[in-house]
Amino acid sequence: MAYREKFPYRTSIEIVNEQCKVLKLFKDLGVHQFRVVDIRRLPHGVTRHLVRIPVKQSVNILKRSNVRMRSSIKLGRESIAWFESDGCDVCNTIVLKGAFLATAWSVESNRLVYTFVSPNTRMVQDIVSTLEELGFELKILGIERFRGRGLVLTEKQEMALRIALEMGFFDYPKKSTISDISRKLGISSSTLSERMRRGIRRLLEYYFEYL
């Protein structure tokens, strides 16, 4: 689902999700400190979770041969790794409705916070209604419409850079490409590249002018 130059909405919901297979996996392994930073739905119903965990905890996971961990990178005291599992109803609903799942993390027990980006509030209402019909207990923590601050960047530049940041374009390892982001925004890759380049230049000029 592309945003077609409209300013999207950022929604956070807290939900009891006993279906989350990654959460159950980590509990079974005795891993309590972790954060799911990205979720991607792959073909054939497989869901890939990018998870940050303490390095010492990742050793226990590596010992489990039945765990589908695709790759792992050490970043200081943490490891960041991809885990694959069958998708749960929460992740599948958010993604299949056309929203971009920005982050998801555990707060306590089976309760998680999901943050997703959608082009309009109708999609938010559709996602929430579907989850409630599926029997999930949830609470909307906030719905915020993207609005540019207008201090340094144009609204389009700010939106492009913020969506790129949300989608992990500036992360290491990189979690999205120019093509991924341009599809979400409904613009060409060349237009997005130029918009981001001009925006980053403005930020650098502003930074060094007032340093």
Image: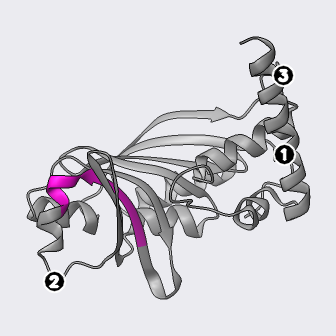
Above or below residue 35? Residue 42 is below
Residue 190 picture quarter = bottom right
Q: Nearer the viewer, residue 73 or 185?
A: 73
Mark 2 crowdedness (10 Å alpha carbons): few <14, some 14-19, many ≥20: few
Residue that carries the numbered disc 2 in the rendered image: 65
Badge 3 density bin: few <14, some 14–19, many ≥20, Cα 10 Å: few
Looking at marks 3 and 2 on the same chain, the residue that comes earlier in the sequence is marked by 2
The correct choice, above or below, for 163 with respect to 22 in the image is above
Name the residue rendered at 62%, 62% in the picture: 176
- On the image, the x and y values in percent for residue 160 come to 77, 45
| Front tag of 3 and 2 | 2
The part of the chain drawn in magenta is 48-58
Q: Where in the figure is residue 133, as x and y percent of width and height?
A: 43, 61
In percent of width and height, residue 76 lies at 31, 45
The percent position of residue 11, horizontal first and vertical second, equals: 56, 41
Q: Residue at x 70, y 65 (%)?
A: 180
Q: Disc 3 marks which residue? A: 150
Instruction: Name which residue type carries label 2.
Output: Ser
Quadrant in the rendering for residue 207 = top right
Comes first in the chain, label 3 or label 1: 3
Q: Amino acid at mark 1?
A: Arg
